[in-house]
Image (tube, rainbow, N blue to C red):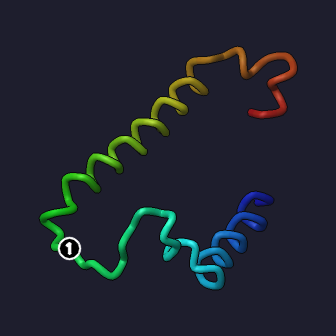
């Protein structure tokens, strides 16, 4: 709850007020619209990498029982 209560307003402020996604430093040229066919492969690869990363983290937490004992117990 704390992460949501703190994180969501920060993300909303960054996107709606600061417009960080429009910054030239992101490397995304929002004015150059490209057809979906040109960007689909790259987008799917990035999404697959993101989900693979989250899956690896979940596997480590699930199989790494050392997190469930001792000083790590508060994290779980």
Placement of the C terminus among the 4 image quadrants: top right
Residue 71 image position (x, y, % from top left): 87, 21
Up/down of 75 relative to 19, above or below: above
Residue 16 drawn at (x, y percent): 60, 83
Q: Which of the 4 quarters of the picture holds residue 50?
A: top left
Q: Secondary structure at mark 1?
A: loop
Read off the residue under disc 1. Answer: 34
Residue drawn at 39 percent across, 67 percent down: 28
Query: Splitting the image into 4 quarters, where does residue 9 fall?
Result: bottom right
What residue sits 76% from the left and 67% below the top?
5
Taking 53 as reference, is 29 above or below it?
A: below
Image: 1 above or below 62? below
The crowd level at tag 1 (other Cα within 10 Å; few <14, some 14-19, many 20+) is few
Question: Which quarter of the image is occupied by the N terminus?
Answer: bottom right
Q: Position of residue 19 (x, y in %)?
A: 57, 79
Residue 56 or residue 39, whichever sits in front: 39
Q: Nearer the viewer, residue 31 or 40?
A: 31
Specify the farthest residue to the front. Answer: 24
Instruction: Please determine whether, in this image, residue 65 is positioned above or below residue 40.
Output: above
Q: Is residue 71 left or right of residue 55?
A: right
């Amino acid at each position: 709850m704390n992460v949501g209560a703190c994180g969501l307003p920060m993300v909303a402020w960054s996107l709606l007020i600061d417009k960080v996604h429009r910054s030239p430093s992101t490397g995304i040229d929002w004015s150059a619209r490209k057809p979906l066919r040109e960007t689909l492969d790259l987008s799917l690869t990035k999404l697959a990498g993101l989900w693979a990363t989250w899956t690896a983290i979940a596997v480590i937490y699930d199989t790494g029982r050392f997190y469930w004992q001792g000083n790590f117990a508060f994290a779980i």
